[in-house]
Image (cartoon, rainbow, N blue to C red):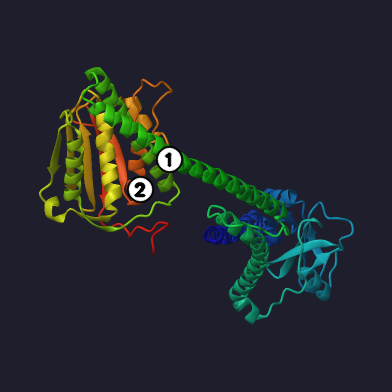
Amino acid sequence: MTSVMRLIKRFVITLILSLMVLLVLNIVLIIAALQNDKESLGGWKTASKLTETLTMGLDGEYQLSEEGKRMLEEGNSWAVLVQDGTGDVIWHSENLPEEIQLHYSAAEISWYTRGYIADYPTTTAAMGENLIIVGNPKERYWKELYPTWNLNLIKNLPRTILIFFGANLVIVFLIYMIVVSGILRSVKPIVQGIQGLPGGEEVYVKEKGLLSDLAAALNRVSEMLRSQEYELKKKERARADWISGVSHDIRTPLSMVMGYAAEVEEETEASEEIRQKAGIIRMQSIRMKNLVNDLNLASKLEYNVQPVKTEEINLVALLRETAVYFMNLDIEGKYPVELRVDIHCISDGVFSGDKELLKRAVNNLLLNAQIHNPAGCRIWMGLSEYPKEFCVTIEDDGIGVTDEQLEKLRNTPHYMLSSGTFSEQRHGLGLLIVQQIIAVHGGRVAFGQGIEKGFRVDIFLNKRRKAIKMEGEKG
């Protein structure tokens, strides 16, 4: 649900930022709109300026300057000058409408000052003791006739605006959360179902709500995965049973072949050629037996049915035992083994794991060097220590591997490099078992080329790994 909460958090932040942007934008637009109308001040500025441009001539008549005429023309306005005391119009502009009267009572002046004359919004200004009234176009201004406001309302206006804004924000947020909660109720089971798919859980989501189509698709995917998992397990069981059966059935005839070959090899009356061929048959039978055992072990490791016995292992002693066993089988001495151990590992090289499996891994690497170098080669076994790992190294100076083969070793799932021709050398099942054994012990394997251009394998074992638990072992 972490991803859903992140999604909701992002929606909320987007909402708040959107409201803030809208607020700032509205304030800017209002200021811009008021700024455009600021010059006219609703016509009051025109009335005030007319008092400066209207003067009395020598003949006792009022005359409007060119600036005043321009002001009235630009605003499409008209003006009258009302005499104090009499209420008579003693001057008016040339464009005075016909419906405008030329005499005003005190009551009418009081009304027209704050309102309209014949629907023309008016503004006024004092010119001495007289009064100038400017009439503006009917559709230009709107005048409020009763502009008196409560002083406390004006004082509290900022707080009132904040309260209104906060209330609106809360309402919008509540509406948003109601909508989000509805979406969440539809999304939550789908997200939980998707999270359950990788773990192999049986997933079923009710197909209702806004995302019913998505829920139905998820249910179909879950059903398809369960069906595929069942078929895959069925095939895996069949393959494991087949491997186990073949391994069991081949032991008896293979033992007979090895026994008869050994008898022929030791027969003194047989010719040297026949005895050599019998020896080859015996050696190849041993190799075949090891391959069958490797195949069976690989299958067990793959399906986690190989019991792992955890014990404290002295890695130096393990390497020595494996090297001695290997050299005892090398009657011709074509594969000398040299052991190189860091001085700290002699006392500190203790690791917790399955001794027999680790010996099998090291022995497979030694046999790998022997199989791929029939003319013989030197082999170096090393043990070094790092702050968090031990490193077991098996290296030879044989034919080695090409860059292409090395790339396949690192990326091919079962490390089979054979293209189908029997004559081509390959690094296959033995290295796969090494990988599986080391993986069971929480380590890793690295393939590369040695200093002498041969083949090199580094096994890294974590010193602080957790205890091993596999099927067949009591936890």
The answer to which image quadrant residue 296 occupies is top left
Nearest-to-viewer mark from 1 and 2: 1
Percent x, y of residue 107: 82, 76
Q: Which residue is mark 1?
A: 247
Q: Are marks 1 and 2 in contact (CB under 8 Å)?
A: no
Q: Amino acid at mark 2?
A: Ala
Quarter of the image where the C terminus is located: bottom left
The answer to which image quadrant residue 21 occupies is bottom right
In the image, is residue 142 above or below residue 359? below
Residue lying farthest to the right in this orientation: 99
291 left or right, relative to 232: left
Quarter of the image where the N terminus is located: bottom right
Q: Earlier in the sequence, mark 1 or mark 2?
A: 1
Q: Which residue is mark 2?
A: 439
Name the residue located 67 percent from the left edge and 53 percent from the top edge: 219
The answer to which image quadrant residue 413 occupies is top left
Percent x, y of residue 460: 27, 46
Name the residue located 13 percent from the left edge and 45 percent from the top edge: 341
Disc 1 packing (10 Å; few <14; some 14–19; many ≥20):
some
- Nearer to the camera, 462 or 145: 462
Name the residue located 58 percent from the left edge and 54 percent from the top edge: 194
- Nearer to the camera, 139 or 441: 441
Name the residue located 50 percent from the left edge and 41 percent from the top edge: 242
Residue lying farthest to the left in this orientation: 343
Q: Amino acid at mark 1?
A: Ser
Give residue 310's mark. none
Q: CA distance from mark 1 to mark 2?
A: 24 Å
- Nearer to the camera, 368 or 447: 368
Percent x, y of residue 34: 64, 58
Secondary structure, mark 1, is helix
Percent x, y of residue 281: 31, 26
177 left or right, relative to 276: right
